């Protein structure tokens, strides 16, 4: 059950980044309307699949598709 939820959350994050391009983590949370816990679970899922990468700019964390 949780795996399905994480997969759906990962799809929301992936689709948002595909549409908007690189974003800071705060904007990903707003854009997907996911809880922080679900957003970070989605990040973990996508990172394990080598679909996203993270970069820190000016003390802010950005995420983008690989």
Image: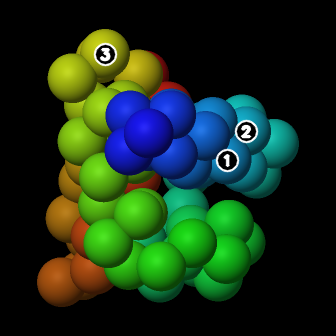
Residue 8 seen: yes
What x and y, as percent, mark residue 23?
54, 62
Look at the numbered discs 1 and 2 and tell me whether their residues touch, using CB distance below 8 Å: yes
Q: Which residue occupies 21% across, 23% down?
A: 48
Q: Which residue is mark 1?
A: 12
Q: Which mark is residue 15?
A: 2
Q: Give the left or right position of residue 53, taking residue 27 as reference.
A: left
**Can you tell which of label 1 and label 2 is closer to the viewer?**
1
Q: Earlier in the sequence, mark 2 or mark 3?
A: 2
Location of residue 2 with respect to 4 vertically, above or below: below
| Element marked by disc 2 | helix
Q: CA distance from mark 1 to mark 2?
A: 5 Å
Viewer-closest of 6 and 12: 6
Q: Which residue is mark 3?
A: 49
| Element marked by disc 1 | helix
Viewer-closest of 8 and 30: 8
């Amino acid at each position: 059950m949780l795996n399905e939820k994480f997969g759906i959350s990962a799809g929301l994050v992936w689709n948002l980044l595909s549409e908007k391009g690189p974003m800071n983590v705060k904007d990903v949370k707003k854009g997907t309307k996911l809880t922080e816990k679900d957003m970070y679970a989605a990040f973990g899922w996508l990172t394990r699949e080598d679909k996203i990468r993270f970069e820190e700019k000016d003390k802010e964390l950005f995420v983008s598709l690989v």
